[in-house]
Amino acid sequence: MRALLAALAFAGLAAFPALAEKSAPPQWYLDDIKTLSAAGGRWIADNADYKSEEEPFESYGTEWKSRFDGATMTGRLYGYKDGAQTAFDFWEFRQYWHPGRNEAVVEQFGWGGAVGVGALQEDDGGTRSDQTFHNADGSVTRTGHKSRFTDENTFVTESFDIVGDEWKPRRKYVWKRVPEE
C-alpha cells in the first residue's frame, strides 16, 4: 500500500513539473537550516545589556535540530542564571517550508500560552520574519526578527515591534556556536 501511494504521489508530481518545482524550498532556506543545526545546533548569546531584576539571565541559549532531510527545523530557547541552564524552555520553535503557500513559516510556542506564526523571507543575505502573536491574555502583537550570519560560528539577531508598517527596534543579540561535547 505504501509503495502504491508513493508511486501515485511521484506520478502526480511528474505530471505537473512546474508545481513540483514551485513548491520546493529555495536554497537560502535550506542553507539557513543547515547552518543553524550544524555541529549540534547549540548557540549562546550574552544578555548583559538586558539583564535586570525582572530578567535575571546572564545569557540565553538556543538549540536547533534539522528534520526531514533538512527541510524542517525545530528549536528551543532557554536561559542561563548563575551559570546554570534553566530547567524549562521559554520558547519552542518550528520552521518549515509550506508548499501550498510557497513560503517559509516560523511558529513559536511560549511560556504562558503565547503562539506566534509568520513568514520567513530572505533579506539581503540573511533572513527576516514577520510574526503575529496571540497571547494568553487575548492581546495580539506583531514582532519581527532579522538574522544574519557573520561567519559559520556567529550570527546576529535583531528583534522589532511592528506597528502598522513601522519596525521599531527592540533588542540585538550576537549568538556564538557552542561546539559539540
Image (cartoon, grey):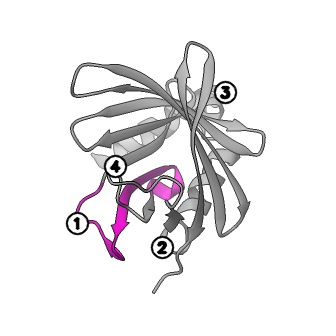
Measured along the vertical axis of the image, is residue 129 above or below residue 141?
A: below
Measured along the vertical axis of the image, is residue 118 above or below residue 170?
A: above
The numbered mark, 3 or 4, whose residue comes first in the sequence reads: 3
Image position, residue 71 (x, y; %): 52, 49
Camera-nearest label, 3 or 2: 2
Measured along the vertical axis of the image, is residue 85 above or below residue 125?
A: below
Amino acid marked by disc 3: Ala
Quadrant location of the C terminus in the rendered image: bottom left
Amino acid marked by disc 1: Ala
Q: Please give the range of residues in magenta.
A: 66-89
Q: Secondary structure at mark 4?
A: strand
Camera-nearest label, 2 or 4: 4
Q: Residue at x 69, y 46 (%)?
A: 28
In the rendered structure, the answer to whether residue 130 lies left or right of residue 132 reads: right
The numbered mark, 2 or 4, whose residue comes first in the sequence reads: 2
The CA distance from mark 2 to mark 1 is: 19 Å
